[in-house]
Image: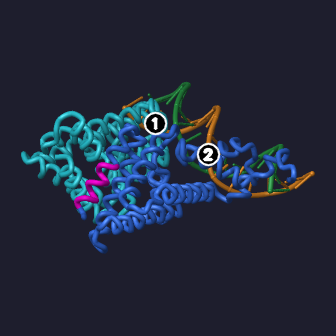
Chain colours: A blue, B cyan, C green, D orange
Amino acid sequence: MTNEASTTERAVPMRDRLIECASDLFYSEGIRAISADRIIAGVGTTKATFYRHFPTKDDLVMAYLERRADWERIALTTAAQDEDPRRVLKAISVLLADSSCQPGFRGCPFINAGAEYVEVTHPVRRLVDEQRNWWWTYFRALAIRLGTTRGKPADAVADQLLMLRDGALIAGYLGDASRVEAALSTAMNAVVAAAT
Amino acid sequence: MTNEASTTERAVPMRDRLIECASDLFYSEGIRAISADRIIAGVGTTKATFYRHFPTKDDLVMAYLERRADWERIALTTAAQDEDPRRVLKAISVLLADSSCQPGFRGCPFINAGAEYVEVTHPVRRLVDEQRNWWWTYFRALAIRLGTTRGKPADAVADQLLMLRDGALIAGYLGDASRVEAALSTAMNAVVAAAT
DNA sequence: GTCTATAAGAAGATAGAC
DNA sequence: GTCTATCTTCTTATAGAC
């Protein structure tokens, strides 16, 4: 094979290095708390290069959230491949609870971004909406597989499961992450049982 | 026109006017998004006066959150005075859902502050913990009144009800506020039914 | 594509007069 | 308690050389 070890730094394009660094910093400290300078220093480049790749800071914020959205969808669909919808529900609980227990867990990046971006028409908020709609649609389909009647009943169960997902991530961040799994799976089962 | 320092305006002490203005701005736009200058301009005073009342901006942030905590506790205990714990549960759902439907609703100020303040030892985060503990203790007592066995079962129900409260406020802000009441009360009832 | 240098403004906070 | 004036640092963003 060709020698690429000596060109490790050059192998990763600057754009990806900026997104990678931004993803860590924005998530762990908040978007407004991180200046472009911090990211520039983090990857070891200059302002000019930064702004060549991302005309404004918000463009990098969008790239950060798009990457997070991809991760989240992949993580969920990977963890929830079981045929049995009840085991899928359990797997989702375990996935969310495990994430909550990881060091550096700071809750849902989309909920956090929502707290920082107020304007509903802002691209960031549109992306947050999109990701939340994805979750809701996923939960609605799961509700149907679990035996909930299509239409309003399934919509209602999707609302409740999304509510529990959001609450679980808040609890994982601001509460006791070690209790999230029990509370989340118990509540999800209760909600599904009451609707089927 | 009329003198700005009219009797009504002067009757409210500067400190309270600063907290009042900060409360509106911090909640509606986010804490980091609002500079001291914006608040100073909002009440029509100067930097020197601002920093005489609040040595740092974070001191004002604390005053803002303490006021919000007081409001929340008063609102809840006022809305939930019924003898019947099932009607109390319903009243909480209605209170949270109604709040979500108010114009300018931006979710839970404590969850939002948590998104902006990362350091767990920061006074803001301690206050967030305190308010969340208050809710949890309230829910645990309610769970017992609803017939849940004291100890672990009641603790588990409190975890789940708090999870639903948090998720409901997220849904009220980032989702469809008009569907919060149905989802929240249905899920709370399901969780309680499964534990009694 | 990347660098040095810098603009232009906003941020949190203070000194000293009245 | 309040004001004018100021300080320092940080912020996003750009110009122009290599």
> Is A192 inside the magenta-drawn segment?
yes
Subunit of label 2: A
Please name whichever residue, A142 or B125, is drawn nearer the observer in this view of the structure: A142
Give the residue at the far bottom of this rendering: A151
Disc 2 secondary structure class: loop
- In the rendered structure, which amino acid carries the disc numbered 2? Ser
Q: Which of D16 and B121 is in front in this view?
A: B121
Q: Where is residue B139 drawn, in percent x and y?
A: 22, 42
Q: How far apart are marks 2 and 1 (CA)?
A: 19 Å
**Residue A35 bears which disc, if any?**
2
Q: Mark 1 points at which residue?
A: B57
| Residue A156 visible in the picture | yes
- Using a 10 Å C-alpha cutoff, classify the residue at mark 1 as few (fewer than 14 neighbours), some (14 to 19) or many (20 or more): few
Which residue is drawn at the image coordinates 28% and 46% (left, top)?
B160
Residue stretch rendered in magenta on the structure: A185-194
State which quadrant residue B178 falls in.
bottom left
The residue at 54%/42% (across/down) is A28
